[in-house]
Image (cartoon, rainbow, N blue to C red):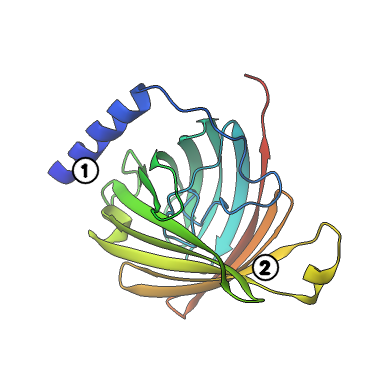
């Protein structure tokens, strides 16, 4: 609890500080900031160090053997992401939960991006606020022909079990890649979260994203999201 309070105090101070100018919404052309099953940008359950982008907005609907989730998120500015989600578990009542993420450090050539945040800020799920600190680093053309690799490493409480989580997303080559047209991009995902290994596949086309997942090699999940950009302020 003391760690959680310290993390939130740091987050509040950072949000109050001036934000650096962003580069625009990150998913207008199918970028890497797809929402995960818990409503924050990331892999399947693990949050990464990316945010939705400056004035980005998205919605998602995910369905699984154990729970369904429906929600949205917005980026008031490049470093901050705020979200709300209806979490509908199989054998319990539904709850609306709120998420937040703040990017502490942009990814550089040799250093990872760094973000702090929380899932279920008000502990509606009675699992304690799932605070997290995550680092993400991309490796362009990690495997020739196949594609880029993105690795995430972090630590979190609540749903993350007061433990380390880790994962990666590898872009997959398909015959469509040789065509000089706008086309979907596919990736494979693997992660370790709260002593479970989860795997999945993701497809992106423009702002649309579809994800299928196998949690702990036992429970199935899948769904879609759409992300675009607002230019109202």
Q: Position of residue 52 (x, y in %)?
A: 55, 42
Element class at badge 2: strand
Instruction: From this view, report whether residue 179 is shown above or below residue 209.
Output: below
Residue 9 left/right relative to 55:
left
Q: Which one is nearer the viewer's eye here, 133 or 195?
A: 133
Tell whether 85 sits left or right of 159.
right
Point out the residue furthest to the front here.
109
Q: Nearer the viewer, mark 1 or mark 2?
A: 2
Instruction: Give the crowd class for mark 1: few <14, some 14-19, many >=20 residues within 10 Å.
Output: some
Residue farthest along the top direction in this orientation: 233
Image quadrant holding the N terminus, namely: top left
Q: Quadrant of residue 100?
A: top left
Give the residue at x 46% y 35%.
79
Q: Nearer the viewer, residue 127 or 6?
A: 6
Q: CA distance from mark 1 to mark 2?
A: 36 Å
**Circle 2 residue:** 186
When asked about the image quadrant of residue 98, the answer is top left
Measuring from the top left, give residue 185's x and y in whole percent.
70, 64
Q: Residue at x 56, y 50 (%)?
A: 33
Q: Is residue 131 above or below residue 150?
A: above
Above or below, comparing residue 220 to residue 154 in the picture: below
Q: Residues within 10 Å of mark 2 (few under 14, many from 20)?
A: many
Report the side of 218 relative to 1 (left or right): right
Seen at 61% across and 37% down, the residue is 57
Residue 30 x/y as whole percent? 68, 52
Q: Which mark is residue 4?
A: 1
Provide the secondary structure element on which disc 1 rests.
helix
Residue 51, horizontal then vertical, whole percent: 50, 43
């Amino acid at each position: 609890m003391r760690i959680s309070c310290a993390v939130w105090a740091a987050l509040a101070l950072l949000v109050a500080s001036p934000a650096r100018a962003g580069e625009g919404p990150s998913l207008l052309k199918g970028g890497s900031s797809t929402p995960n099953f818990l409503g924050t940008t990331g892999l399947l359950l693990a949050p990464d160090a990316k945010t939705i982008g400056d004035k980005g907005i998205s919605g998602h609907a995910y369905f699984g053997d154990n729970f369904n989730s429906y929600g949205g998120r917005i980026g008031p500015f490049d470093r901050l992401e705020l979200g709300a989600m209806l979490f509908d578990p199989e054998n319990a009542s539904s709850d609306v939960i709120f998420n937040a993420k703040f990017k502490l450090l942009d990814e550089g050539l040799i250093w990872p991006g760094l973000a702090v945040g929380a899932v279920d800020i008000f502990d509606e799920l009675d699992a304690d606020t799932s605070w997290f600190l995550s680092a993400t680093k991309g490796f362009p053309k990690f495997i020739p022909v196949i594609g880029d690799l993105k690795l995430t490493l972090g630590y979190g409480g609540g749903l993350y079990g007061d433990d380390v989580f880790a994962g990666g997303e590898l872009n997959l080559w398909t015959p469509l890649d040789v065509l000089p047209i706008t086309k979907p991009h596919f990736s494979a995902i693997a992660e370790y979260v709260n002593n479970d290994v989860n795997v999945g596949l993701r497809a992106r086309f423009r702002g649309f994203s579809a994800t299928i997942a196998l949690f702990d090699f036992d429970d199935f999940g899948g769904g879609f999201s759409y992300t675009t950009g607002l230019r109202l302020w």
